[in-house]
Amino acid sequence: MFAITLLKWFRENGRDLPWRGTKDPYAIWLSEIILQQTQVKQGWDYWQRFMQRWPTVADLAAATEDEVLREWQGLGYYSRARNLHAAARQIVAAGGFPTTIEGLRRLKGVGDYTAAAIGSMAFGLPAAVVDGNVYRVLSRHYGISTPINTTEGKHEFTALAQSLLPAAHAADYNQAIMDFGAVQCTPQSPRCDTCPLTDTCAAFREGRVAQLPVKQKTLKVRERRLTYVYIRCQGMTAIHRRGAGDIWQGLYEPWLTATEPPRGAVLLCQNVKHVLTHRVLYADFYLLETDERPPLPADYIWVNEAALSDYAMPRLIEKLLTNVLTPNKCLNSQQMS
């Protein structure tokens, strides 16, 4: 009855999303990668832009990584964009999309959930998706207190999800349970008063809706301080591309200094807060206007200020550029003596 009820709810309440109603694995895969860690309302526009610029996986594979990162700018979690580009090249090299769950899992950046989503929606494979929405719906309906971010929890919920999947309707069921979690059984203020599953929902019956799902406490959030100097020199500015092994790999940023900013640098903004997973950044932004290029590390390049939009940059750096281009917007402006 659980699956039947969800499918009926989906027919009446399912979200109208542009990547639905298609069996094109490229369109489905692209949507799933974009929607990792991203809300639908934000990801929608990115999906449309990617599809317009690179309508096939071969088009995406032929792009440069810089072009893909630039189009991705603002979505965060940039490893997704790098993996997307690498996987596109894998697919083209193999002659097309894998048509098995095992083959899909071998694509860069594709895990169990994404493989099940693509496999069921594009190829009708009987694989159940398990994401945050699914964890929440199943834990509440069946009253499961096993933490969802433990190995035990992942195995338990994956097995339960697979056992509930109607093989002949895998695509619709997977979309139904995800939509149900996103629209009906929401994290906060779920719509229990109009829920078609209240009669069989353990959490509703036991008054534990707000307590489920259970999540084990994870790593402590760390803080990090950054000091940036935007150099303006005769219409040019210096940037460099961040390397591997740290945040924002492959993205560009202005001069990041570990010492005091040079004499003449103006403090535009101080302690600008930027939150990442398990990390909170606090950045100071300076502007240095000069007629001579200061000595910088060898990996910095000089580019025309008007061409900065051609380089993919983190959201934090976009804030810096806004402050550079909009004088007096920030507080705490002062000149280093």
Image: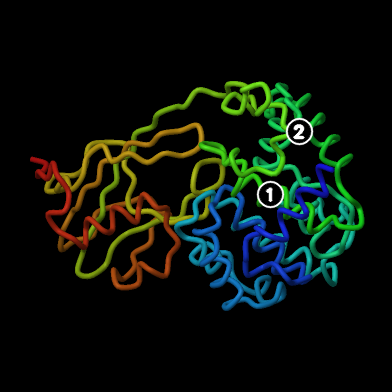
Amino acid on which disc 1 is placed: Met
Q: Residue at x 68, y 49 (%)?
A: 178
Expressed as whole percent of the image width and height from the top left, the position of residue 322 reads 26, 58
Residue drawn 77% across and 67% down?
Answer: 25
Question: Which SS class for mark 1?
Answer: helix
* Rendered location of residue 106, percent (x, y): 81, 52
Q: Which residue is mark 2?
A: 200
Badge 2 amino acid: Thr
**Could you tell me which quadrant the C terminus lies in?**
top left
Q: Is residue 20 above or below residue 250?
A: below
Within the image, what quadrant is residue 259 found in?
top left
Residue 274 tag number: none
The answer to whether 58 appears left or right of 311 in the picture is right
Residue 176, given in percent of the width and then of the height, sits at 73, 53
Towards the viewer: 6 or 164? 6
Q: Which residue is mark 1?
A: 178
Q: Quadrant of the N terminus?
A: top right
Which dot, 1 or 2, sits closer to the camera?
2
Report, in whole angstroms, how far the alpha carbon at label 1 lies from the one at label 2. 19 Å
Relative to 117, is 220 above or below? above
